[in-house]
Image (cartoon, grey):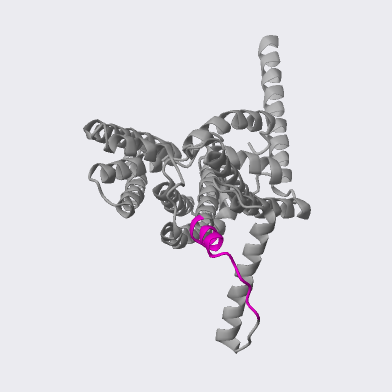
Amino acid sequence: MAEAIAANEDAAREEESFLTTAEESDKRAEEALNRRVPSWIKLLIGASLAGIMVLSFAVGRYPIGPVELFQTIGGLANNTAALFLKAGFGISIPTVDVDPTMATALINIRLPRILVVVMVGAALAVAGASYQGMFKNPLVSPDILGASAGASFGACLALLLDMPSFYVQLFAFVGAMVAVGGAVWMNKMVNGYDAILGLVLGGILVSTLFQACTSLVKFMADANDKLPAITFWLMGSFARIDQNDFWMILLPMAAGFVLLMLERWKLNVLSFGEEEAKSLGINTKQVRLVVIFASTLIVACSVAVSGIVGWVGLVIPHLARAVVGPNYKALLPASMFIGASYLLLVDDLARLASSTEIPIGILTAILGVPFFVFIFRHNMKGW
């Protein structure tokens, strides 16, 4: 009898301890979500991106001095304003002589590349942050549903068939969308599993299938011609970016960014669990589909123009979470800006580190692993 009473008292103490721990955890989570980001941090994040963009204009195989850079940019801005004022209001202002060679290099070569790198970095980071919240897992990256594997197969198939670069990008985009669509379809087919687990299983199956198809394409490719092109594309690069690439991805990426920004407050609720989200009136199935569609859209555009660029979508959300906290209203914009800045710095390093431009996928992996270990070890507040 005494032993039974003692056992009941121990069970009661354990239950009380568990409830106390749960209450403390909920309180810490609430404090983290209600954390206000100081204005100076927001300004610093924005100013860092602007400064890195200016630096990226100056560096390269043919560096441009600060004076020449600002003179050219100022002259181009002045001449553009003069043209606009004269055409729209009939107001004439003096124009400035600009070196045509330098203006061409800045406008037609470096500006499109910088803008595309910024958009790709922002896309990978915001997609990674969204997936981490939706799957409630800090180890999730944008390729969890097979987007990268599908894009790789599509691009490799186009390269094998010796298609122009536009079709390589188109096939990569379609491959990414088909792969994620296949993962979602497999999740629906597996009715007995949890929705999140079903998506993960579907992503693993689809990734394995498309990776096998990519290996088959590489096996069939000419070792002296097409195989090197396929291998180089898979390593990721921005070396061939031009204005057409920017305009091609602008609208789809803008649509994806807008959708994710509209859903960011729901990601806060979804990160606490399925039942709690449903109790607050959130249609969890609809939110997941919107997040998956928007994330896939921007990741597919990114992979189509740059190839496989890993670790950005895994590392940057943790860094942003360390800076602004786990509230997705601040986390998603911060991830976009920090991801854009990070990838732009890595791209500058890829252009400067060697006489031959290093594929950016190699550098993001080399830098991402130790960076991730450091960030993940010192910041688990969001989880």
- Quadrant of the snapshot with the C terminus: top right
Q: Is residue 155 above or below residue 380?
A: below
* Image coordinates for residue 56, horizontal then vertical, percent: 60, 50
Query: What residue appears at the point 60 percent right and 89 percent down from the top-left corner?
Result: 90
Residue 42 counted in the magenta span: no
Give the magenta range: 94-109
- Quadrant of the snapshot with the N terminus: top right
Q: Is residue 281 visible?
A: no
Query: What residue appears at the point 56 percent right and 57 percent down from the top-left corner?
Result: 261
Is residue 227 toward the left or the right of residue 363 in the image?
Answer: left
* Image coordinates for residue 48, horizontal then vertical, percent: 69, 50
| Quadrant assignment, res 43 | bottom right
* Image coordinates for residue 159, horizontal then vertical, percent: 28, 44
Closer-to-camera residue (237/319): 237
Query: What residue appears at the point 47 percent right and 50 percent down from the top-left corner?
Result: 295
Is residue 161 toward the left or the right of residue 285 in the image?
Answer: left
| Quadrant assignment, res 314 | top right
Is residue 241 toward the left or the right of residue 375 in the image?
Answer: left
Q: Is residue 52 visible?
A: yes
* Image coordinates for residue 220, horizontal then vertical, percent: 21, 33
